[in-house]
Image (spheres, rainbow, N blue to C red):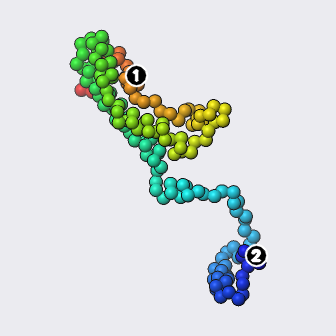
Amino acid sequence: MSEGAIREDDPRDVARARRLAEDVEGSPLKGKRLRQRLKNFVAGPDSYVASMGGPLPWMQRRRMIEDETAHHERRLASARRELAAACGSEAEFARRWRRIADAWSFHAVNELIEKHNRNFPAEARLPMDPGTGDFVRLNGKPYRLEPLDADWVLERFPASGLQALRVDVDDDR
């Protein structure tokens, strides 16, 4: 007996067949050939959990890293403008700005970055590159994020350009 066969001696099968016939009666597809669905895709339990629970942990963590980094950038830009207004020479500005960059604390965001670098490959199920033995690159870039430090600050906010900063400060007034 095939899987979908109806056993006439089973009242449940008879009732099920009757309900199916009633459902099909009003269908605009009755009597028409249906397109066969491909069955090579099976959603795993993790897909269901992700769709019901919202962003995955690595997504949430990545967003927190981006938000924290943007917060640091705004604070650093403000501190740099204030320092430019207070300094009398380019050399004094450069010396004091480097000192601020060295002392700036990125502890919280660097903790998130370290956690990202440690957990992201497993959480995102990155495939391994058999040639290198490392995880594949994402859009040609490594998945690892670099921690923020004084070099990061000085790259984005150089310890020079006092005159340009003063013009910006004067324009803001």
Q: Which quadrant holds the N terminus?
A: bottom right
Q: Is residue 3 above or below residue 150?
A: below
Quadrant of res 28? bottom right
The 10 Å Cα crowd at callout 2, few under 14, some 14 to 19, many 20 or more, is few
Q: Residue at x 35, y 17 (%)?
A: 159
Q: Residue at x 53, y 58 (%)?
A: 48
Q: Is residue 71 above or below residue 25?
A: above
Q: x, y (%) of residue 133?
A: 62, 34
Mark 2 lies on a secondary structure that is: loop
Query: In screen coordinates, is 122 left or right of 15?
Result: left
Quadrant of res 76? top left
Q: x, y (%) of residue 42?
A: 63, 58
- The CA distance from mark 2 to mark 1 is 71 Å
Q: x, y (%) of residue 34?
A: 72, 68
The 10 Å Cα crowd at callout 1, few under 14, some 14 to 19, many 20 or more, is few
Q: Tell me if label 2 and label 1 are in contact, CB under 8 Å.
A: no
Residue that badge 2 annotates: 2
Name of the residue lying farthest toward the right? 1
Q: The disc labelled 2 sits on which kind of residue?
A: Ser
